[in-house]
């Protein structure tokens, strides 16, 4: 191979419209059900990877937002880099420098953009040029939702039958439907139970099997709503799907309660707005902040109204973003 060269890549986080919760195989991150998301424009992780040909033992170096990372954070990145080392056929240690342009703890899952950008930068720096599906499969191993940050726009993660066919594909480009995610931040505290642990608890809820059994039906409705740009159907589908996931979380053992009082009041208010004609719908991930999905024309009004709800600290807006991409060489 040619000598490894430093390489930088960008990826957006994404918000799931049909959620991933629970794995058939935790080690391979093979999901219990398929999921659909949109990438979030304007928010991104930039990651630079340099493989050091002089070092074939010892630890990788990982710097996140200007601070060195050790312990479990470094271990997760190094285990991911082991996959790339295996593909590249070398043992070089890596120097990884990563930064998010959005604050951690804002309710935006940074692991998706983190492993999307890392997968692209690390493989390219190793001289590997993976097809999109293979890059998505690789990103999945770092964080399940990261496979959806590889393709652009509206994205579906195909659950697949195994490692080879569990990856994400684009359903439509960003310009297909200019939706906006108005993120109402109600708390920036670190969540007590992270997603990786949460996925392992999903099968302990008696509701998970019913949620998974019906997933194909919800995915189908979501695909159709996106294709037809049918906001009312999308709204009904994403709120049901979010409620189902949180029902599983709240009935697992131990139970996981991600909602705060303000989260519930925002959800109720958004449903009321829609009844009165404002095209907006809520969805929540594994945290208390609420993503309010709007049609572009209504985003400014929704953001203004959200900011006025007691307990909402801040509202951020993001349109639909493109795929993971390489940065220009430094
Ligand atoms: C609630 O992808 O963060 O955001 O694979 O363990 O990294 P790991 O989990 P992660 O789980 C995301 C869960 C979710 C729903 C979703 O994004 O589909």
Image (tube, rainbow, N blue to C red):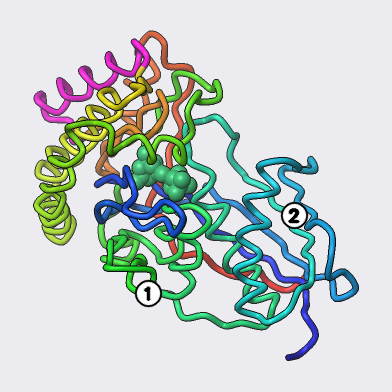
Find ligand 1 in the image and state its quadrant: top left
Please provide the residue range marked out in magenta: 260-280
Q: CA distance from mark 2 to mark 1?
A: 29 Å
Q: Residues within 10 Å of mark 1 (few under 14, many from 20)?
A: few
- The residue located at (76%, 42%) in the rendering is 70
Please say whether residue 268 is visible from this viewpoint.
Answer: yes
Relative to 125, say whether 46 is above or below.
above
Based on the picture, tell me whether residue 265 belongs to the magenta stretch: yes
- The residue located at (62%, 74%) in the rendering is 123
Residue 33 shown left or right of residue 312 in the figure: left
Q: Position of residue 90 (x, y in %)?
A: 73, 79
Q: Position of residue 237 (x, y in %)?
A: 14, 42
Residue 35 shown left or right of residue 328 in the figure: left
Q: Nearer the viewer, mark 2 or mark 1?
A: 1
Q: Pick the residue in front: 267 or 216.
A: 216
Q: Pick the residue in front: 285 or 32.
A: 32
Residue 319 shown left or right of residue 47 in the figure: left
Label number found at residue 164: 1
Based on the picture, tell me whether residue 94 belongs to the magenta stretch: no
Q: Position of residue 276 (x, y in %)?
A: 10, 24
Q: From the image, tell me which residue sits under label 2.
A: 97
């Amino acid at each position: 191979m040619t000598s490894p060269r430093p390489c930088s890549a960008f990826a957006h986080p994404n918000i799931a419209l049909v959620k991933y919760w629970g794995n058939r195989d935790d080690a391979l991150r093979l999901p219990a059900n398929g999921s659909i998301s949109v990438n979030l424009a304007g928010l991104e992780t930039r990651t630079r990877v340099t493989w050091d040909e002089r070092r074939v033992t010892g630890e990788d170096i990982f710097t996140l937002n200007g601070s060195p990372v050790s312990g479990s954070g470094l271990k997760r990145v190094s285990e991911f880099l082991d996959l790339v080392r295996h593909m590249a056929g070398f043992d070089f240690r890596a120097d990884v420098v990563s930064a998010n342009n959005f604050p951690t703890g804002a309710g935006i899952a940074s692991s998706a953009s983190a492993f999307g950008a890392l997968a692209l930068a690390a493989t390219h720096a190793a001289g590997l040029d993976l097809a999109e599906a293979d890059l998505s499969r690789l990103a999945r191993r770092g964080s399940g939702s990261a496979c959806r940050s590889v393709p652009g726009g509206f994205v579906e993660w195909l659950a697949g039958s195994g490692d080879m066919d569990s990856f994400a594909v684009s359903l439509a480009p960003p310009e297909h439907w200019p939706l906006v995610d108005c993120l109402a931040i109600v708390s920036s505290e670190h969540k007590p139970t992270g997603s990786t642990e949460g996925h392992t608890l999903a099968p302990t809820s008696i509701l998970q099997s019913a949620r998974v059994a019906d997933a194909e039906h919800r995915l189908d409705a979501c695909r159709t709503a996106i294709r037809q740009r049918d906001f009312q159907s999308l709204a009904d589908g994403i709120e049901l799907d979010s409620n189902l996931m949180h029902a599983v979380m709240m009935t697992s053992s131990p139970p996981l309660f991600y909602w705060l009082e303000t989260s519930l009041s925002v959800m109720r208010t958004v449903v009321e707005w829609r009844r009165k004609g404002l095209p907006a719908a809520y969805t929540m991930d594994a945290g208390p902040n609420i993503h309010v999905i709007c049609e572009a024309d209504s985003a400014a009004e929704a953001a203004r109204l959200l900011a006025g709800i007691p307990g909402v600290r801040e509202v951020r807006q993001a349109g639909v973003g493109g795929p993971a991409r390489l940065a220009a060489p430094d």
